[in-house]
Image: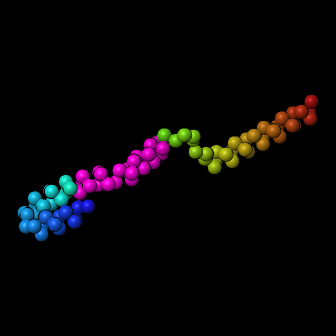
Amino acid sequence: MFVVPLAILLALGLWPWASAVIAALVGLCLSYLLLGKSRASVARDLYHARHPDKQTANPDSEIEDSLMSAQERVKSEREGKSQ
């Protein structure tokens, strides 16, 4: 979106620095108009990455939690049998 306007402006004989500035402005405008869906998608993905709906589960934490509950279950069974 920058190269095509730059090439056209240079072919028309404008000064190179003016062609570069105008091509940059044209490219910025075109990308803003034509890439709106992509921009919205990236913004939505960034928002969901920063504000997750639920916490992601850590596999190590799940393993530790299951081991702790198993140990508590065994401990309660032993206390029940000793009484």
Asked if 19 appears above or below 50 in the picture, the reply is below
Q: Position of residue 35 (x, y in %)?
A: 34, 54
Q: Position of residue 13 (x, y in %)?
A: 7, 67
Q: Measuring 61% from the left and 47% from the top, which residue is drawn there? A: 58
Q: Position of residue 14 (x, y in %)?
A: 8, 63
Q: Measuring 16% from the left and 66% from the top, which residue is drawn there? A: 8
Please tell me whether residue 35 belongs to the stretch shown in magenta.
yes
Q: Position of residue 61 (x, y in %)?
A: 64, 45
User: On the picture, is 29 further left or further right than 45?
Assistant: left
Residues rendered magenta in the picture: 27-50
Quadrant the C terminus occupies: top right
User: On the picture, is 27 further left or further right than 16?
Assistant: right
User: On the picture, is 68 further left or further right than 47?
Assistant: right
Q: Quadrant of residue 74?
A: top right
* Front-lying residue, 67 or 51: 51
* Front-lying residue, 14 or 71: 14
**Is the magenta region chiefly helix, strand or loop?**
helix
